[in-house]
Structure formats: C-alpha cells, structure tokens
Image (cartoon, grey):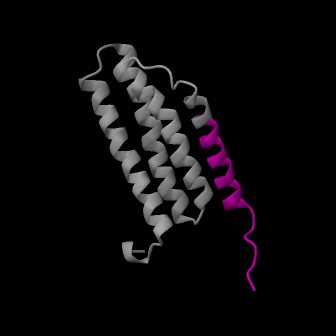
C-alpha cells in the first residue's frame, strides 16, 4: 500500500502516529540530556515509552483496518504522556488527572483491537 491509496482518515491518523513517535524520541533524549533530576528523567522515560509503543500500535491497528482502536491509542498516548512530560520538564502537575484517563483509553484500544482481530467480520452483500 502506498501513500496515495490511503484515505484522508488513515493519512491523518498515520501522521498522528508519526508525531507520537517523534515526540517520544524527543522525550527519551530529554530524559538523558536535559532532565534536572532522576525523578524528571523517569517521568520523561515513562511518557516516551508509552508514546513510542502506541505510535507503533496506531500503525498496526490501521494495517488491520481497526480505526477505533487507532483513535483510542492516539488519544490515550497523548493523555497519558502529556502530564508526565509537563511534570518532568516544568514541575506542572495540574493535568495529572489525564494520565489515568489516557490509561483507560489505551486499555479500551487494546481490548477493541483484540475483539476486532478475534471476532468474525460481518459479511457484506
């Protein structure tokens, strides 16, 4: 499949996955080079790992036509990683409530992807 055969939704969702990958690598580098404490480095590493794993999960979901899980992965990775990044880089904790919501979104995405892959697809006439 090449880029020209993708619909707008898949291109946008794929671009979101690429952005997650980019931000994850930046966060992981920041954890090693600009973090001011071990706690800050740990927060950046956790956020980077979650975001990087789910960037790949978005691509995998799109490859099997599982669009809703791909969206949930994108939302969940953002909601999970953003508060960790803000806390690690600036000590900002007001968005900490987003992390558990992001985790729930990621869990829902994995559960739906599992169902998508195991349950039979409806036949079209």
Q: Which residues are magenta?
A: 103-125
Residue 5, placed above or below residue 39: below
Q: Locate the C terminus by quadrant.
A: bottom right
- Picture coordinates of residue 104, whole percent (x, y): 64, 37
Residue at 71% in and 60% down? 118
Residue 45, placed above or below residue 112: above
Residue at 59% in and 42% down? 106
Per the picture, the main secondary structure of the magenta-coloured stretch is helix
Question: In the current view of this chain or complex, which residue is farthest to the front?
Answer: 94
Q: For the image shown, how many numbered marks are present on the structure?
A: 0
User: From this viewpoint, is residue 41 visible?
Assistant: no
- Picture coordinates of residue 56, whole percent (x, y): 46, 51
Instruction: Name the side, left or right, on which 12 lies relative to 70.
Output: left
Residue 97, placed above or below residue 67: above
Q: Locate the N terminus by quadrant.
A: bottom left
Instruction: Name the side, left or right, on which 102 lies relative to 84.
Output: right
Viewer-closest of 101 and 34: 101
Residue at 48% in and 19% down? 93
The question of residue 96 being in magenta is answered with no
User: From this viewpoint, is residue 12 visible?
Assistant: yes
The question of residue 106 being in magenta is answered with yes
Question: In the current view of this chain or complex, which residue is farthest to the bottom?
Answer: 125
Viewer-closest of 95 and 69: 95
- Picture coordinates of residue 79, whole percent (x, y): 52, 36
Residue at 32% in and 39% down? 25
């Amino acid at each position: 499949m090449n880029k020209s055969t993708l619909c707008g939704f898949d291109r946008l969702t794929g671009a979101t996955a690429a952005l997650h990958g980019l931000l994850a690598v930046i966060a992981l580098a920041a954890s090693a080079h600009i973090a001011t404490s071990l706690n800050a480095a740990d927060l950046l590493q956790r956020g980077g790992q979650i975001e990087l794993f789910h960037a790949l999960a978005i691509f995998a979901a799109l490859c099997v036509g599982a669009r809703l899980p791909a969206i949930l992965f994108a939302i969940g990775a953002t909601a999970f990683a953003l508060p960790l990044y803000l806390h690690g880089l600036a000590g900002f904790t007001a968005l900490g409530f987003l992390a558990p919501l992001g985790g729930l979104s990621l869990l829902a995405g994995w559960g739906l992807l599992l169902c998508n892959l195991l349950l039979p697809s409806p036949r079209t006439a």
